[in-house]
Image (tube, rainbow, N blue to C red):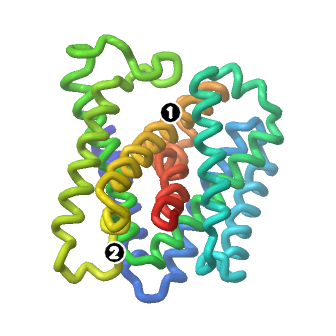
């Protein structure tokens, strides 16, 4: 399983990384739009819309991303959209993580489908806009999510159950602990301070997420990083809740050893639009 995961990860990076560094952003746009289309296909299946309808939803979502690009939305000021989508993520997380799997399963499938597809297209717009803000900015957002996830895994594994006896969300994702979540948060705060310090005086191109946040003051930066890390965890937990409601372990088997696209980007979906929101607040 580990070998399979590594091979899949290497292949994905081999496709994605060159498009990130390419001067022409169209390759990045096409690859990520296809990825979001695959995520929409998975989401449709989680909502009970399988077969041809799931394929149609995936294709239309990828087409919506393309139309957003051609219409210039990726270059536009979308503060209002980020505020609306960000508020929706916070409200959905607060409501359904508190009420549990049954509360989400009771929502009409058509409404679940529509909400998810809007969230996917919004996350794609935020991803492309982050790339247009600079590779430094894009990777600072990605590292926030990856750092929180990796640190949470190791802290949860080595410290879980020793200090705090309560799981983070036992009915949704039994493997997650408070130790892991707090360890991930501390790791991201450390990353933020180190990244900002290393960037100061260096020619890293456009400012990173952390430098932009610290420009508004240390307190604002710390609060924003805590908030974004919390929403990263919430995105991960929400996807676990959605899968439990659908009665599946993975969103699909598109990525051998990793599950599906949604299993890889779940934490990024709320963080991307919220990162752009807090940077322009």
Distance from the alpha carbon under mark 1 to that under mark 2:
30 Å
Percent position (x, y) of residue 9?
Answer: 35, 55
Q: Which mark is residue 93?
A: none
Residue 129 is left or right of residue 46, and the answer is: left
Element type at marker 2? loop
Graded by Cα atoms within 10 Å as few (under 14), some (14 to 19) or many (20 or more), the crowding at tag 2 reads many
Q: Are marks 1 and 2 in contact (CB under 8 Å)?
A: no
- For the residue pair 129 and 27, the one nearer the viewer reads as 129
- What residue is drawn where x is 46% and y is 17%? 170
> Quarter of the image holding residue 20?
bottom left
User: Residue 85's x, y, as percent?
Assistant: 64, 53
Q: Residues within 10 Å of mark 1 (few under 14, many from 20)?
A: many
Q: Is residue 122 left or right of residue 176?
A: right
As rendered, which of 97 and 22 lies closer to the eye? 97
Give the side of residue 173 with respect to residue 63, left or right.
left
Judging by the rendered image, the residue that carries numbered circle 2 is: 207
Q: Disc 1 designates what residue? A: 237
Mark 1 vs mark 2: which is more N-terminal?
2
Pair 1/2: label in front: 2
């Amino acid at each position: 399983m580990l070998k399979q995961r590594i091979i899949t990860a290497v292949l994905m990076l081999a496709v994605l990384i060159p498009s990130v560094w390419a001067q022409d952003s169209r390759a990045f746009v096409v690859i990520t739009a296809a990825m979001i289309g695959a995520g929409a296909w998975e989401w449709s299946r989680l909502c009970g819309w399988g077969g041809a309808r799931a394929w149609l939803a995936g294709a239309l979502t990828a087409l919506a991303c393309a139309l957003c690009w051609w219409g210039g939305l990726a270059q536009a000021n979308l503060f209002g959209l980020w505020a609306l989508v960000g508020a929706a993520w916070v409200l959905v997380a607060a409501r359904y993580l508190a009420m549990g799997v049954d509360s989400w399963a009771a929502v009409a499938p058509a409404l679940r489908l529509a909400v998810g597809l809007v969230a996917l297209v919004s996350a794609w717009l935020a991803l492309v806009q982050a790339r247009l803000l600079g590779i430094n900015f894009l990777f600072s957002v990605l590292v926030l999510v990856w750092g929180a996830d990796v640190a949470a895994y190791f802290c949860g594994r080595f410290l879980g159950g020793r200090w705090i006896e309560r799981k983070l969300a036992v009915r949704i994702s039994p493997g997650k602990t408070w130790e892991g979540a707090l360890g991930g948060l501390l790791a991201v705060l450390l990353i933020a301070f180190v990244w900002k310090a290393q960037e100061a005086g260096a020619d890293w191109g456009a400012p990173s997420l952390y430098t932009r946040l610290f420009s508004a003051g240390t307190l604002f930066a710390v609060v924003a990083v805590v908030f974004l890390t919390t929403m990263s965890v919430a995105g991960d937990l929400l996807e676990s809740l959605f899968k439990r409601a659908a009665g599946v372990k993975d969103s699909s088997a598109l990525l051998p050893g990793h599950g599906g696209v949604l299993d890889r980007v779940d934490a990024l979906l709320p963080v991307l639009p919220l990162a752009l929101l807090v940077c322009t607040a």
